[in-house]
Amino acid sequence: MRKIRILALIVAMMVMTGVLQAQDEIVIDFYFPQAVDGPIAEAMDRYSAEFMEANPGIVINSVYTGSYNQTRDTVLAEGDDLIVDVAVMLAIDLLSFVEAGTIAPVQPYIDAMDDGEAYVADIYPAFLANGTGPDGQIWTVPFQRSTPIMYYNADLLAVEGFEVPTNNEDLIEVAQALTTEDRFGLLVPVAGIFPSWMFQSFAAAYGQPVTVQGEPDQVYLDTPEALAAVEFVTRLGMPVEDGGFGVGPMGGSAWGDTPTAFIGEQAAMIYHSTGSLTSILANAPFEVGVAFLPSGPAGEDGTGYGSPTGGGNLYLFNDGNKSQEELDAAWAWINFLSQPEIQADWGATTGYIAAFDSAWQTEPLASLVEEFPQYGVTRDHLSVASQEFSAFRTIDLQNIVNGQLARIISGEVPLEEAATVLEEAQAQIDDLLADYR
């Protein structure tokens, strides 16, 4: 079999000929990315060692493959002769790989479990949404999951006498008051080539998520809500004299620089991944607060919350050349990573949101939440989270959305032309999705 490697043990003695003993072992090539600071590689090594000790005959070859996009590109580059067996990849890549026919659904394995229904019920619905295909089957298992969330310098807000913002009007009021020559009031990492994740928070909070579960042939970019959202995000970095809010840099902040600026007290509040929580708590010299994203106008209850989910799921690859033994071993690894003990350790180690409810009653996460309630806020934030961008031809569509949003937010095109840019982007998207409707 292509992926079964023969491990030979040669016993050589000075006066004897060698004796060859062979033992078949199934090797599972496992690719994982890293999108935030933290001991992710070390955690993967621990999990691999624990799994292999409990499952002799299966070897986990864990391979760090860079960013999410680099991981996806590595898999795509393997073409029709896949090396990878399991990978943590963006949850939003699901439909692209289903269409390509290179992944297998995990639904049959779940159906074969004694407690399959309980297994599914244990997964937070907001995370399960991006793992379920149009056919209703579960294709991928949530693992390295997150939402964006607001981090704030609790000491600074207390000194200044501010409550934590719950809508975008309050957000701007606090951010402007906390902006100084040496400190931004608010940083939102929308600079660069991937502004769409943070943008989805604002679009949802204005009332229309960019995509909707169960409608993979639709994208809602040319809407009043999307226009209001992109105008708001763009104005965050515009000078007040030009009609902006003046609370951050023009074009937003860079992803990797944002937590560093917050920890260094160069920003009073930031939007960033829940996956950054452990690192920020460990390094910030002040009390760190976390809160739901107040990205939209106040509703009847005074709040304007909205958020996408984010992060990566566990994908089971099958190009048609893998044996059933290999697929079973790959599922065993996925199932192991979804167990409450691993999920609890993973959440406590990284700050990513444990995707299974039972993990939150399991050590070390249960005790950690008691000591640091911030972790519990990231879990509770799922109550206002919606499906992350998910549509047919996601990779192509994301390129369109990110490219056009970047043009607006960076100031490349005047803000008054934003509606036209969104209309043009929507037309390109509709052309690509026409065959699916």
Image (cartoon, rainbow, N blue to C red):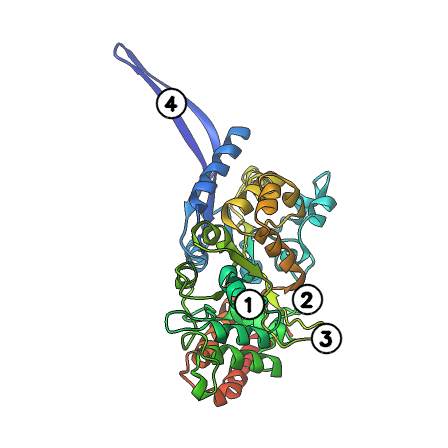
Measured in 3D between alpha carbons, the distance from the residue under mark 1 to the one under mark 4, in whole angstroms, is: 70 Å
Residue that numbered label 2 is attached to: 214
Dot 2 surroundings within 10 Å: few (below 14), some, or many (20 or more)? some
N-term-proximal mark, 1 vs 4 = 4
Q: Secondary structure at mark 3?
A: loop
Residue that numbered label 4 is attached to: 9
Name the residue rendered at 30%, 14% in the picture: 17
Which mark is nearer the camera, 2 or 4? 2
In the rendered structure, are the residues bearing label 2 and label 4 in contact, judged by CB atoms less than 8 Å apart?
no
In the rendered structure, are the residues bearing label 2 and label 1 in contact, judged by CB atoms less than 8 Å apart?
no
20 sits left or right of 383 in the view: left
Amino acid of disc 4: Leu
Name the residue rendered at 62%, 41% in the picture: 340
Measured in 3D between alpha carbons, the distance from the residue under mark 4 to the one under mark 3, in whole angstroms, is: 71 Å
Mark drawn on residue 161: 1
Residue that numbered label 3 is attached to: 300
Which mark is nearer the camera, 4 or 3? 3
